[in-house]
Image: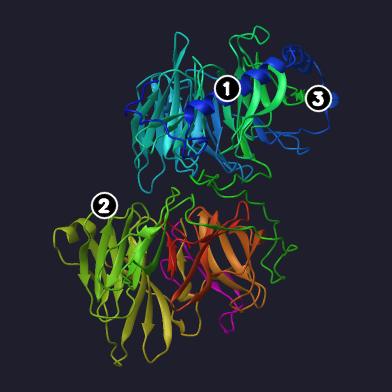
Amino acid sequence: MMSLAVPASSTRDQYFALERASEIKHEFLNGQILAMIGLARRLLFLPLLIALLGVPLAAAQEGLDLPADLYVLYNDGRVERFGVGTSGVATVTPSDAFVLDFGIDPSGTRLAYRTESGLFLLDLSLPGSSALPVEGGSADVPPFRGVGDTIVWSSSGDAIAYTTTYGARVYFSAAGAPVFIDLREAVFRQISWSPGGRFLAAESESEGVRVWWIYRREGAALLLTSIITDGMGVAWISDSDIVFAPNAGGLRLMSLDRANQQISLLDDSTIYRLPALDATDALVFFARDPADAGVPDGYGILLRLERGAQSVQVVGATPVALGGLTWSPDGRMLVAFQGGVMAFFNPADGLGFPLPINSAVAYDWGPVVGVTAPVAPTQPAPATDLPTVVEPTLAPPTAEPLPTREPTPIPIVTTSALVLAADGYFLAPGTNGVVQVWRLPADGSPPAPFTRNTSDAVEFAASPVAQAVAYVVDAELWLQIANQEPFRLARLNTFAPVTPVFSPEGLQVAYADEGTGIWRIAVEAAREGEDPELLRARIVSDAGIEQAMRRPQFSPDGSKLLFDLYAGESGTIANNVLDIASRQMALGVPLPADDPRPGRARWLRDGRIYSLLDAAAAVDSPPGVYLIDPPQPSGGALIASLPAGAVVRAVNEPLSGMLRLVIAPTTAPDAPLGVFDLVLTEGTLTPVIEIGALTAPRLSPEGRFIGGFESLTPEGGTLTVIDLLTGRRFLLSSAAGARQFTWSGAGG
């Protein structure tokens, strides 16, 4: 085995560590395995598999006992979905697209596919939607099909890797211009992201020797960090640990976060193949004793090794022919894929069934149904995209009661870290008692102070595209960028909140100084010591009424600022929109100060504005979601009604034209919360999940996670994150006194 970093000496203190007395343990385990293989029946599964391929589907079973939706590409260029159970078969790609290869995102809601024209994205949660082009002919074509994944999504859905005739290409969907990079070390057969998306593994083959190239992700770049020169199968067991089976025998673990340290799990006296992590977090694989003539070359006995276990288990005693086999995503079934036909069987009991196809060229899986991977010490990553959105029924806005479901127990886990779709930030005391801005990393690392100020931070904003925060300390606005020294953006003329905000590309910061007006500063200009620019000065009317400007927000294209204008004694509030380049102002219609719509107005992705009115305010207008068309903001037009008594606690726009709302049925602070989706053109709330009570909830940018607090007091509370895909609630034990949680990106 060869690695770019010199492997450290073997230890037994992590993951599948068995005992520190490695030689004794090897003798015990390998003796046990040899005995198991020797006792195995000498029946072979190949005849059974051939028989399965000839069985009609109806005779095999009613419905498909699949662990997840199966997507199959045929040689006529169309992709079909075989749904779990009796949900049936459907074509999912456009009829005019001849698909070369494809990949399903971790949530099963998006499909990336290539044609000769380029790479395209298709939203499966919106049937009938058009595919969006990513790039043209530079997307190239796959050099191989049917031997592994050729288009793969990162767990957060922000990167797509795909094999090419020269190696591989990676698309990063960062804010602003997309980024593309090429990998040219070899021509790759298949590729695989680590569970949390920090590493990419790519397999090449030359003269029967398989090589795995491991790349580490650094932002929008991939750096070659390790090479496995002879790996006959690999399996990710965490976001930075990979198990591989050397051709000569043995089973090894490489830790990429520990200088590529390698640990021998099982020695090379036995041949191992097809390692995989199953849904119970155990490692399954096949073993063959080279000295046992009863198990021919290319066959193996199925074994299982639980994390931290002292012995292996025999799962199936019959030798299995391993050619052309891969694991299903839950590690329960084997997939036989040869000559355009597919069949599935359970190697533990030999039961299986075929699929009614005979011209398949590639396949992929959706997310596993009903299985949540356990939270291991190294935090394997769950899927990180938006849960499937149920299409709402067409109906005019109504004020019907919120749809509800019977409450279900919410699984609660106390943990020190989580794998998430985006970084989180919050305020909490540091080790010296000074309130700092903390970062909750998306990669599964524990939260830690991000700033190191000597006085308390009182408010902050997180950059949407980088690890950076703008924060206020002692009436000064500062900027902290990861791994850099902080620098001052501005001196403030007020101790009132200034609500700083980053521009969409993260290169500018705007803020509202209540004593002077709306200001803007470019990050690089501030680094060079330049002063901020006053965009709109506070004025006093002819009647002597002072006007205060608050809550600036950059438009999605960064060209405008939306802000609230409070008119002193007149008791009104309006939304104004400032064109940054021309300084032209679109003046909003003043509303009474007790009408919260101006203060809750936010941009939509298409440049329009929306706002909310709910039971938290007693005004004459009906409660609901209001749509505002610039350039003259107003109270807006009601597009969806809310029931009387309901309060919207959080909202964002995870998909263009769709809002996700967190709603309480009453104004009580401890009221249970429900999550609902609203397609703006439909006007009907569709329930997603009920999550129980949570204080100050905030939706992650893609809408999968909610961050908030348990029992929040002025001194802070317990930071809590809820996964809407699984319903699990995680209490973060590693930061006491947390408050003001927010997400990087367009969370809400």
Of residues 340 and 416, the one drawn nearer to the viewer in this rendering: 416
Q: Picture coordinates of residue 468 (x, y %)? A: 31, 57
Instruction: Tell me the kind of residue under disc 3.
Output: Leu
- Is residue 712 one of those drawn in magenta? no
Quick one: label 3 or label 1, which is nearer the N terminus?
Answer: 1
Residue closest to the eye, 340 or 344? 344
Secondary structure at badge 1 equals helix
Q: Position of residue 342 (x, y in %)?
A: 69, 21
Q: CA distance from mark 3 to mark 1?
A: 41 Å
Question: Mark 3 — residue?
Answer: 57
Left or right, 116 with reference to 518: right
Classify residue 724 by image quadrant.
bottom right
Q: Secondary structure at mark 3?
A: helix
Inspect this view and state whether residue 581 appears: no
**41 on left or right of 141:** right
In the image shown, does 539 or 673 lie closer to the viewer? 673
Residue bounds of the magenta highlight: 606-634
